[in-house]
Image (cartoon, rainbow, N blue to C red):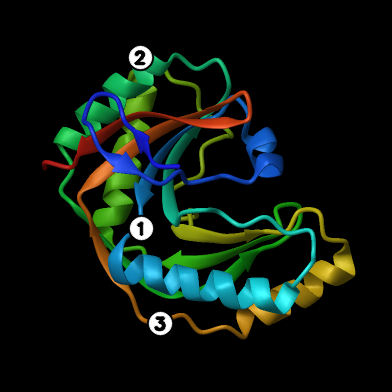
Amino acid sequence: MPRRLTGRLAISEPFITDPAHLSLLDGQRCVLLRAEGELAAAHERVRDELRSLLKDAPVSYPNTAHVTMRAFPAGTDLDTIRQTVEVWARATKPLHLEVDGVSVFGSPFQIVVVVIRKTPELADAYRRLLDESHRAGLPDWPGTIAVDEWVFHLSVAYCGDLDARAWERAAELARSLTPNEGCDLAGNVELVAFEGRREHALGTFALRG
């Protein structure tokens, strides 16, 4: 169901709706860029083709394509996160997101992804959000991933319940898929929390840089 956001008001579809995946995320807080337009269409094509190929395999799929910019563990103060994201958003220009192909994150993650091209602007935005989080005293979780190592992506399928052989097949199928070319200009960032096996929208902030 659509939901109304607090703060900057908007109506949007939730990012995650699968109950099993929501239970894995329980307690987390996430800063997300929503994929729209061509980018969302490219993601949807890969997701639907993979779902058809894998059929009844125990795989979870996100409801809405998104790029995760930061995540925080259960118990992290929501007001501090909200203030940090607002400061960062005011200093950040709208971000260009462009498809760079299909790939996978191997074990123990076992996730199929649409890779987003790492532009200098996107890398700088990631680095500054990390810096703002450190300045605010927010926990560095699940550990600092240097921007040089971070892969910007849209998760397509969460395959953690597949055994090694099934995952190898799923990864091979995923790599054979070719998404449509797609790009999007993300003008907002969203803050969500996962509590009680539900996704809660905590605010949408315009990128104003």
Q: Amino acid at mark 1?
A: Ala
Residue beneath disc 2:
79
Q: Residue at x 32, y 53 (%)?
A: 123
Disc 3 from disc 2: Cα separation: 39 Å
Mark 1 closeness class: few <14, some 14–19, many ≥20 residues within 10 Å: many
Mark 1, residue position? 35
Q: Nearer the viewer, residue 137 or 63?
A: 63
Depicted 34 relative to depicted 45: above or below? above
The image position of residue 35, as x and y in percent, is 35, 58
The N terminus, quarter of image: top left
Note whether residue 147 is visible: no
Secondary element under disc 3, as helix, strand or loop, is: loop
- In the displayed structure image, the side of residue 91 where residue 146 appears, left or right: right
Farthest residue in the front direction? 1
Disc 3 marks a residue whose amino acid type is Asn
Of label 3 and label 1, which has the lower sequence position? 1
For the residue marked with disc 2, what is the amino acid?
Answer: Asp
Mark-to-mark CA distance, 3 and 1: 14 Å
What label does residue 168 carry, if any?
none
Say few, some or many: other residues with alpha carbon within 10 Å of mark 3 (under 14 / 14 to 19 / 20 or more): some
Mark 1, secondary structure of its residue? loop
Give residue 198's quadrant in the image. top right
Label disc, if present, on residue 180 of the rendered structure? 3
Regarding residue 158, the answer to whether it shows in the image is yes
Residue at the farthest left position? 209
What residue is shown at x 35% (from left), y 81% (from top)? 181
Front position in the image: 181 or 7? 7
Q: Residue at x 27, y 49 (%)?
A: 124
